[in-house]
Image (spheres, helix red, strand yellow):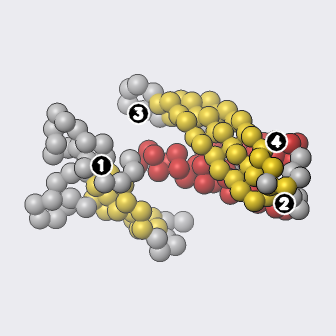
């Protein structure tokens, strides 16, 4: 896996803290820093997600992918899955994630509660590389609701 990240303010008179990531799979992702009122030359323009927001979003995508795949492999009629991640970060540099809560909403027909619990646990404990890495610095908790469709 590879990715090239380039600063968009590196040429001409551009300023700010925007970046473009080009992934090995041929996709592009933009990122930007938070506007910094004290020094606008070092702040972003709020044109894209912050880099750490993309880490959180990627973790959500990783674990939601696992949950859907595990439920489908179990032949459950899953029709939707979302996960809301809330986090806390350290106050001082490096401002790593210290707490992450993942709340899943799984929609389907006749899916047993135990199957959802198992899918989330398997993702959290075995399959989701991103959450397992973040679990080295953050306390990760999960919850879910199951919606009958």
Q: Is 114 displayed left or right of 87 in the figure?
A: right
How far apart in space, not on screen, are marks 1 and 4 (Cα)?
37 Å
Nearest to N terminus: mark 3 or mark 2: 2
Residue 94: numbered disc = 3
Closer to viewer: mark 3 or mark 2: 2
How far apart in space, not on screen, are marks 4 and 3 (Cα)?
33 Å
Nearest to N terminus: mark 4 or mark 3: 3
The kind of secondary structure element at disc 1 is: loop
Q: Splitting the image into 4 quarters, where does residue 109 fall?
A: bottom right
Quadrant in the picture for the C terminus: bottom right
The kind of secondary structure element at disc 2 is: strand
Comparing 113 with 19, the one in front is 113
Nearest to N terminus: mark 1 or mark 4: 1
User: Which residue is found at the position 45% from the left and 64% from the top?
Assistant: 3
Nearest to N terminus: mark 2 or mark 4: 2
Name of the residue lying farthest toward the left: 13
Residue identified by numbered label 2: 77
Closer to viewer: mark 4 or mark 3: 4
How far apart in space, not on screen, are marks 2 and 4 (Cα)?
15 Å
């Amino acid at each position: 896996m590879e990715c090239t990240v380039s600063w968009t303010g590196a040429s001409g008179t551009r300023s700010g803290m925007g970046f473009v990531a080009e992934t090995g799979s041929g996709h592009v992702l933009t990122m930007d820093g938070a506007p910094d009122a004290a020094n606008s030359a070092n702040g972003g323009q709020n044109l894209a997600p912050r880099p750490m927001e993309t880490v959180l979003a990627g973790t959500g995508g990783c674990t939601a992918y696992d949950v859907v795949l595990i439920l489908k492999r179990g032949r459950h009629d899953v029709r939707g899955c979302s996960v809301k991640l809330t986090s806390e970060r350290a106050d001082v540099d490096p401002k790593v994630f210290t707490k992450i809560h993942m709340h899943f909403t799984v929609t389907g027909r006749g899916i047993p509660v135990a199957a959802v619990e198992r899918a989330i646990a398997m993702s959290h404990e075995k399959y989701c590389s991103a959450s397992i890495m973040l679990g080295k610095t953050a306390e990760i908790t999960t919850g879910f609701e199951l919606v009958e469709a």
